[in-house]
Amino acid sequence: MSDKNKQILDQDEHLMDHDYDGIKELDNPPPRWIMLMFYITIGWSILYGAYYFWLKEGDHQDAEYAKKSMKHDDKYQIASLSADELTAFTDEASIAEGKQIYTDMACMACHGMNGEGNAIGPNLCDEYSLNGCDFESVFNIIKNGNPAKGMTAFKGQISDEKIQKVASYVMTMQGTNPANAKEAQGEKCE
């Protein structure tokens, strides 16, 4: 028996009684693995509906987003400091940590390793400032940035406490005279 005859015999057993213009339809069931996936999908949808809608055990998208946002804010301590808490650190450990953060966040790419400034960023060591001379101004420019001048906002990258330490370190730079310092920019601080 040839392969062609065998195929015709196999088709004959799958033929349905349905006939239209001489065209006969084969009853060709889907493979078992597809049917298994189909039944698993139906079962999963029933469990999903029960968990989220009928029993109301699971959170909907907006509640889940709020929870994840709170976890993120807690992890990175994004909550803003009040004006009373916004003071410059003076202890050596905080200043050293501020210097480390200055290095880790690559501030030297724009302001130089010692705050001397370069073609991109201003000199942080002189008595002049583009954004205000007080600690709050330095803190705010590090936190919120100034996109028009190319200053990155760091509020989404580090916590307010770390920004406070970097600002404290930057304030200790004022009055130092590093080599190759950039010329003064902005208003003179009094």
Image: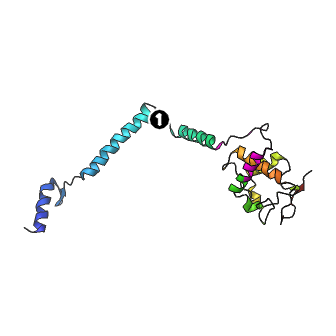
Q: Is residue 117 magenta?
A: no
Q: Secondary structure at mark 1?
A: loop
Q: Which residues are magenta?
A: 76-99
Q: Is residue 6 left or right of residue 126?
A: left
In this view, the residue farthest toward the top is 55
Q: Residue at x 72, y 62 (%)?
A: 109
Q: Is residue 120 visible?
A: yes
Q: Is residue 42 left or right of residue 112?
A: left
Three-letter code, disc 1: Gly
Return the residue nearer the eye: 161 or 25.
161
Is residue 1 positioned above or below 145 on the image? below
On the image, the x and y values in percent for residue 49 come to: 41, 37
Give the total number of marks visible in the rendering. 1
On the image, the x and y values in percent for residue 42 come to: 33, 42
Q: Which residue is mark 1?
A: 58
Return the residue nearer the eye: 36 or 161.
161
Return the residue nearer the eye: 26 or 126.
126
Is residue 104 positioned above or below 43 on the image? below
What quarter of the picture does the N terminus occupy? bottom left
Q: Residue at x 66, y 42 (%)?
A: 77
Q: Residues within 10 Å of mark 1 (few under 14, many from 20)?
A: few
In this view, the residue farthest toward the left is 1
Q: Is residue 140 visible?
A: no
Is residue 124 positioned above or below 85 on the image? below
